[in-house]
Image (cartoon, grey):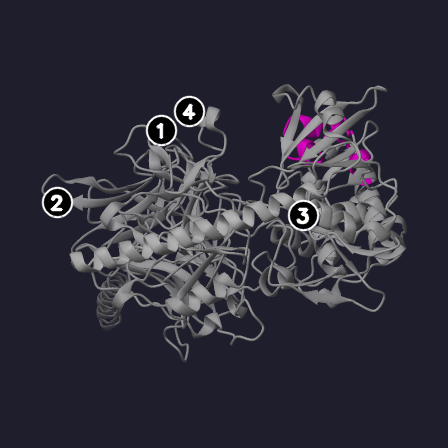
Amino acid sequence: MDNQLLYMKISMEGFAKTSFLFSLFSVLLISIAVDTMNETWFITDGETIISSGGSFELGFFSPGVSKNRYLGIWYKKISTGTIVWVANRETPLADTTGVLKVVNPGILVLLNGTNHTMWSTNSSSSARYPVAQLLESGNLVVKDLKAADPGHLVWQSFDYPGDTFLPGMKLGKNLVTGQEWYLSSWKSDNDPARGEYTFGLDIHGYPQTVLSKGSTDLFRSGPWNGVRFSVPHLRPNSIYKYGVFFEKDEVYYTYKLLNSSVISRFILNPNGVAKRWTWIDRTQGWTIYLTVPQDSCDTYELCGPYGSCNVDKSPVCGCMNKFVPKYPNNWNATDWSGGCIRRTQMVCQNGDGFLKYTGIKMPDTRYSWFNRSMNLKECREVCSENCSCTAYSNLDIRGGGSGCLLWFGDLINIRDFSDNGIDIYIRMASSELVKQVVNRGKKRVIILGSLGLFFGMLLLGLGLIFYFRHKKKQTSHLNREGHQIHSSEQHYDNRNQQEDLELPLFDFATIANSTKNFSINNKLGEGGFGPVYKGTLEGGQEVAVKRLSENSRQGLEEFKNEVICIAKLQHRNLVKLLGCCIEGEERMLIYEFMPNQSLDYFIFDHTRSTLLDWAKRFHIINGIARGLLYLHQDSRLRIIHRDLKASNILLDISMNPKISDFGMARSFGGNEVEAKTKRVVGTYGYMSPEYAIDGLFSLKSDIFSFGVLVLEILSGKRNRGFSHPDHHHHLLGHAWILYKEGRSLELIDEHARDSCCLAEVLRSVHVGLLCVQQCPEDRPSMSSVVLMLGSEGDLPQPKQPGFFTGRSLLEAGGLSSEGAVYSANEITISLLDAR
């Protein structure tokens, strides 16, 4: 018995020692792997894991005065516990029963006390031996412990930023998966749910960072120039280095710290202000290093198109040299939104050129094109050949400059930076281009002056001879009423006598009297042709009078083109031309009056759009389709409108749509299906890719514009300038995403949603996407469109829409088909060392 007791005593002591050693080993193992979780080890509220160097900690917290619990990551080494990432920001825990686990096939799940999933990761890849690890960078990753590639990650928190941008994170887009990386603010200091502000890298055109509130842009940094973005407070420094990268599968902006002992973060606050903070050990607190926006000139579009902002001047907005306010009265009242216009209007490829502007912030590049291989001379040549190109510049300012960046449309968001700005060349009328001659000695001055005087006298003499001959020629062309007709109008009259237009001619006095001498109170608006006035003829008939302005972007050719085109067209969905006036310097078109103005007056206005229920919108879509079908197929001439947009759709008293403004239209012969022009005209946002970039237009160009118009009518949003907090696509891209996800109904304007017919809505979205497909041959004909809108049959599946700039970054090519195509895959912009 004693031996048995002795044996039991020894056994118990051995077991105790073994248990102690096992416990010690377990504690040691856990202490070594405090940054890692696996399938057998999970954390509950009150427990944390810490990165290997002790910089970051993962656990549960409550923000501010809130009692809700969230899973988050915060700084460990500093005492404030600053949160840098939140997992369940939209689904808080109500108590402290939360548990974070790793489960097969490599998913992190957050469970509440009832074992309900509050948050989980998603990934297309899996792991046989999944572990979750908090890295020293603050990145929470899931990976396979025994993977052949140790660097392969199943999932990472850096792909899902919150309100904080840490070193090593990316802002941009994966071009293969479509995933976008951008910051989104908290709702408040007590609620980490997504707020209304976002900050990211816009890759439409040439990349630039953008701060937005919902769909409204608040700040744009301007393009990356190889050294910095085009703002003075974002420049190389001694704290961090940063850059924009173009890689095979992704485009992104990132930064890294130059000193690992420095703690710096960039955060988007709930109030919409982005700030870079650095931690100061001496004061044990954060200090602001950078703020965006920094001043009033950072406000997007503050000074309007071609307006330049300078915080050192009062008022801060001014027009660029050679530009004048578009609306002087508004400008003087500090309403600068209308911006500026060229002092002398251009006639493209007929004497225009480029004027160099120095020391400015580069304009918004959302509607731009770039090529890294071109030099500045080649860049100028490409821009000069395309009338839609308004400016060009070097892409990269390093080493004297390289690459080519082209702008299309108005230049927006310019500011004066003096010595910190960039050089840009803006298209101007030839009369505004001044050749600067450097005098090299008094002798040269005298010689040049003498030559100038000689040639001046010669030109004056020739001018007088020409004047008197011209005057004599003019007097021979008096009409029977005694009114003088200029030789250009006489040429017009002679050339078109055979046309037999049967179009009434109004005399100037009649039109002036009907518009109360073109009173400002009778002015309906103004377009590219000139101002439009309401008039009342002697019989009481109301008319709309388009008067060619002296500063009009259009001229005699467009005037004649509109008369010739529309005088031969008669359709209930085309605006009716009643006559014209050609007298002296005056050129006017007289149309039937449309009391409800244009379509854009309704659909893009939050209040007036309530008047357009679904039935009216669908009626308008069908009316435009029938009018376009008539132009393309049923009229005496096959007409391509080339400028179909919301402002060119007029509405009569019964809200019937009528297509107007045929100044840019072109007619095709029976066998013609496509043509090419160097003078690209129209409106960005509505142009088809092949037309905007290569100048190729066809019936399918109008089809694309119609598709854009359909999606705008459905949504009440403009394609150009559209933005969304969840992505950086324009309206076409947004409609495409919703369609692919089966959520097309979400596209519909809230004012039409309650009255809509689901089948008609879905069919309209489907038809709109068919019309805006990238390849012209994929788009349906107008006869097919009318049939599809009115039938209930099956529709073909649409392909990805053609985005405005014509080619995505993956297929960015030249503006001319003759030039080489330069893929974005071949472009790499490296990070710069700070100076």
SS assignment at label 2: loop
Tell me: residue 125, above or below residue 114.
Answer: below
Task: Residue 721: give x, y in percent of width and height.
Answer: 55, 45
Tell me: residue 211, above or below residue 516.
Answer: below
Dot placed on the residue nearer the N-terminal end, 1 or 2? 1
Which dot marks residue 666?
none
Residue type (three-letter) at the residue carrying disc 1? Val
Marks 3 and 1 close (CB-CB < 8 Å)? no
Label 3, label 1: how far apart the Cα atoms are: 77 Å
Q: Is residue 515 visible?
A: yes
Q: How many numbered tags mark residues here? A: 4
The span picked out in magenta is 593-618
Dot placed on the residue nearer the N-terminal end, 2 or 4? 2
Within 10 Å of disc 1 (Cα), the crowding (few <14, some 14-19, many 20+) is few
Label 1, label 2: how far apart the Cα atoms are: 27 Å
Label 2, label 3: how far apart the Cα atoms are: 79 Å
Task: Residue 466: give x, y in percent of width and height.
Answer: 55, 50
Residue under circle 4? 332
Which dot marks residue 488?
3
Residue type (three-letter) at the residue carrying disc 4? Asn
Between 52 and 269, the one lying in front of the other is 269
Residue under circle 1? 65
Task: Residue 25: give x, y in percent of width and height.
Answer: 24, 66
SS assignment at label 4: helix
